[in-house]
Image: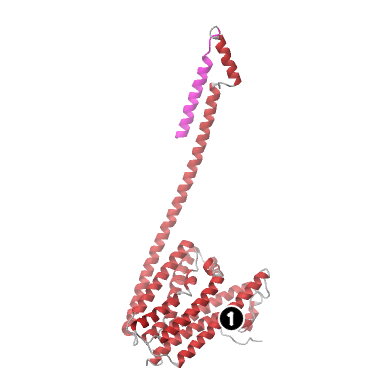
Amino acid sequence: MDARTALRGTFATAQRSAERTASTTAVPRYRHATVTTNRCESAKRGDHPHPARTLDTAARTIDAAVRTLDTAERTINAAARTINAVLRTLDVAVRTLDTAARTLDAGVCTINAGVRTIDSHSPYSRSMEPVWIVLAIAAVACVFCWVASEITGDTPWVDRLWSIVPVVYVWVFAIAAVSDGRDAGRLVLMSILVTVWGIRLTFNFARKGGYAGVEDYRWAVLRERMSPSQFRLFNLFFIVLYQNALLVLIAMPAYTAWAHPTTLTIWDVVFALLFAMFLVGEAIADQQQWNFHAAKQRAGGMLEPGFLTTGLFRYSRHPNFFCEQAQWWMVYCLGAVAAVSSGLGFWGGAINPTIAGALLLSLLFVGSTKFTESISASKYAAYADYQHRTSMLVPWPPRG
């Protein structure tokens, strides 16, 4: 028996006892007749409530109090269940972060071993100080992206860093060269070019809402095609770790230029001008795409044929993707010029390990472009004909 049942039972017993007492107790008629009459009149007027009515009112009050206690108990139980669920979620999050920390630690150890191997065997490696700084920044970026995505449930944290951290990495090598008193002309040139690239791409990403919580629609499609656990693993290993590693690799030609501080050549001018040309091409393509989507929105969400086919998009289905890749190939070429100028020759100079960054970036773009086009083809009936007529990446006169 709980406290509320006992309380009701005790009060019912007291109520019955009071009623029996009230019925058996009477004032003799021959005594205090005037007082009795006055009391009866007062009772009729309601000046002095009858004991039974008082007890009934008290019973209702106690019943209301008991119901309030019932409600409070249910609320407390619900709150306890919520707290337990939160604690379980936090426990899972802590275990996940612990796993991520161990994974990152193993990754850093692997990178350190690789860097030491390069440092001991590379014919042009004399010191690795700037590399350690770049790797430290990359490790912090990985942890930040992973923790932020776990806390917020928001995927594109790497996208928000994409146009920023490569600029930082290249400037790390440029500042190191200046501090060491080396010929830093080529590195300063590379840093300026990459900085302009970063400013333009950051602006384009921001105006599309990238820093205001707007997510690339492709992440949502991938999330729907995977289970939650699969997508979390995909987020950790591909989005966070692989793409942050790729951002380091595309900046590594700056390491080649730092390790070979030779003077600028005519080839540096050629590749810098090509970089600028591709930068302008990407800016034009992005602006044409921006204008098209703005017009499409004004038209109520549909503008035939549903996708852009004019301007640069007449010659390439993704001219901005092509120009983005080409700019990083020019960065690689600038690093290769430094290696060749130092006497390394074709193998080890023109073709050196830092080609991995530009190569992996191109492979990433090919894969992501095919995925993007599979979505477009499922939405627009005319897209298959556009694919047949127009080159996917490299600008080329349309067929037919």
Left or right of 393, for residue 107: left
Principal secondary structure, stretch drawn in magenta? helix
Give residue 168's position: percent from left, percent from top.
43, 76
In the rendered image of this protein, does residue 394 appear above or below residue 96?
Answer: below
- For residue 246, say whether it is visible: no
- For residue 88, say whether it is visible: yes
Q: Tag 1: residue type? A: Ile
Q: Which residue is at 39% across, 76% downward?
A: 134
Left or right of 125, for residue 3: right
Left or right of 185, for residue 283: right
Give residue 90's position: percent from left, percent from top.
42, 57
Residue 46 falls inside the magenta stretch? no
Q: Mark 1 points at which residue?
A: 284
Q: Which residue is at 51% across, 87% downward?
A: 274
The stretch of residues the image draws in magenta is 1-29
* Quadrant of the rendering where the N terminus is positioned: top left
Of 278 and 88, the residue lying toward us: 278
Give residue 129's position: percent from left, percent from top.
34, 78
Furthest residue in direction top, as rendered: 30
Quarter location, residue 209: bottom right
Count of numbered circles in the view: 1
Quarter location, residue 130: bottom left
Give residue 289's position: percent from left, percent from top.
60, 76
